[in-house]
Amino acid sequence: MTKIIILPGDGIGPEVTREAVACLDLLSDHFDLGFRFEEHPFGGAAIDACGDPLPESTLKACRNADAIFLGAVGGPKWDRAEKRPEAGLLGLRSALGLFANLRPARVIEGLEDLSPLKAKVAAGADVLVVRELTGGLYFGARTDEGEVATDLCTYSREEVERIAHVAFREAGRRGGKVTSVDKANVLATSKLWRRVVEDVAAQYPDVALDHMYVDAAAMALVAAPGRFDVILTENLFGDILSDQLSVIGGSIGLLGSASRGEDGPMMFEPIHGSAPDIAGLDIANPAGAIASAAMLLELGLGLPEQAAMLNNALEQVLVDGVRTADLGGDARCSGFGAQVRERLEARLARHKAMIEHLAINRGCCA
Ligand SMILES: NC(=O)C1=CN([C@@H]2O[C@H](COP(=O)(O)OP(=O)(O)OC[C@H]3O[C@@H](n4cnc5c(N)ncnc54)[C@H](O)[C@@H]3O)[C@@H](O)[C@H]2O)C=CC1
Ligand SMILES: CC(C)CC(=O)C(=O)O
Ligand SMILES: [Mg+2]
């Protein structure tokens, strides 16, 4: 039995999560993977249920899970809540030690028209953002004295080292290049970041390293996304740059992500938020959630064959021209999910036929 904790959250979170989990369920049935899905309150929904965005029971279930899947949290309903839904998300990432957040983005071949960039600029763009997830401004001390407020940004050598190792290892498996993004012309934390990244780079002679200031990197991402392979950056910069990067492939609704720590269960979530402006309308794009489910299969559970099947089915739906509103179409969230499962079922049927064919042949030869 494989226990997968589901945190649908708020806004479009439950809508996109439903589509992704249905894909996982289909694969579990076909391959007899024994997935058991356990849903828990989280974010605004948990505030409504018990006054806490991260209830103790939810955290306990996550700690004991094989993998965690999250929709999204937040929304205007809780803007004035004593503890906001987003505090639950930061608390969960921190409690599970999920310091590394991987956000891959690419322009799919033949789908350059989805990019707002010129086809020539977009072609071949394939970037992995490795975002530090449990340090920096989001986790520093805050003060708010009414007319003056502060947020403290802190990074230690150890925090930079461990995320840098993740980025260099990923680059070694991909295009062999890390671009470290900071603001080392101004910020002390960025100066430390750059020194430590240089030190770690010395251990990876086959991976090229360059540095960019975050403002120039934001510009280069839209001017020449093809120059990047792995972007290594801190929490705030990674949050902002990955939303920007998502548009290069078409829409924020397309991107999934994986978060991991030194050990323990990994967490998977689309990079978007709860999108209150479209919640409840069944028009959200579930592709990012489904891509996150594929990452869960591959990185969380070590099932690359099943992950590839799901990714192929997802890509085929886009190649076939099915588009949700964010991509200029009129497909529904549920309809898009159903189309992915239809393509997936066709692949599973072919897989079953192939296994039966091999079994018959083996029987003949025995
Ligand atoms: N991981 C999480 O749970 C995150 C939560 N949030 C929270 O979500 C709430 C809304 O934040 P926003 O700044 O509006 O960011 P957002 O990512 O929710 O939405 C930004 C824009 O993108 C669109 N969009 C997002 N996902 C989409 C999808 N799957 N399909 C089609 N369109 C999509 C939305 O309609 C909106 O116009 C806030 O409370 C914020 O704190 C924001 C980012 C991440
Ligand atoms: C609460 C926020 C830090 C969530 C977010 O925007 C993200 O992780 O992408
Ligand atoms: Mg974000």
Image: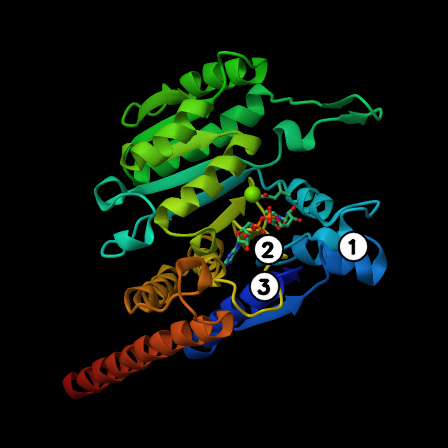
What percent of the width, then of the height, locates residue 148? 79, 21
Q: Which mark is residue 243?
A: none
What percent of the width, then of the height, locates residue 178? 35, 29
Q: Residue at the spot x=20%, y=82% of the render?
A: 362
Q: Which residue is mark 1?
A: 55
| Mark before the other along the chain sequence, 2 or 3 | 3
Q: Residue at the spot x=30%, y=49% of the render?
A: 107
Q: Residue at the spot x=78%, y=54% of the render?
A: 55
Q: Which residue is mark 2?
A: 275
Amino acid type at circle 2 is Ala
> What is the distance, in whole Å, between disc 3 and disc 1 at their CAs?
17 Å
| Mark before the other along the chain sequence, 3 or 1 | 3
Q: Contact (CB < 8 A) between labels 2 and 3?
A: no
Amino acid type at circle 3 is Ile
Question: Is residue 134 or residue 219 the one in the foreground?
Answer: 219
Where 165 sits versus 288, above or below? above
Q: Quadrant of the C terminus?
A: bottom left
- Looking at the rendered structure, the secondary structure element under dot 1 is loop
Q: Which mark is residue 4?
A: 3
Amino acid type at circle 1 is Pro
Viewer-nearest of labels 3 and 1? Answer: 1
Q: Quadrant of residue 275?
A: bottom right
Where 9 sits versus 179, above or below? below
Viewer-nearest of labels 2 and 1? Answer: 2
> What is the distance, in whole Å, between disc 2 and disc 3 at their CAs?
24 Å
Where 35 sits versus 235, above or below? below
Query: Does residue 248 appear left or right of residue 17 in this picture?
Result: left
- Looking at the rendered structure, the secondary structure element under dot 3 is strand
What percent of the width, then of the height, locates residue 49? 81, 63
Q: Quadrant of ligand 3?
A: top right
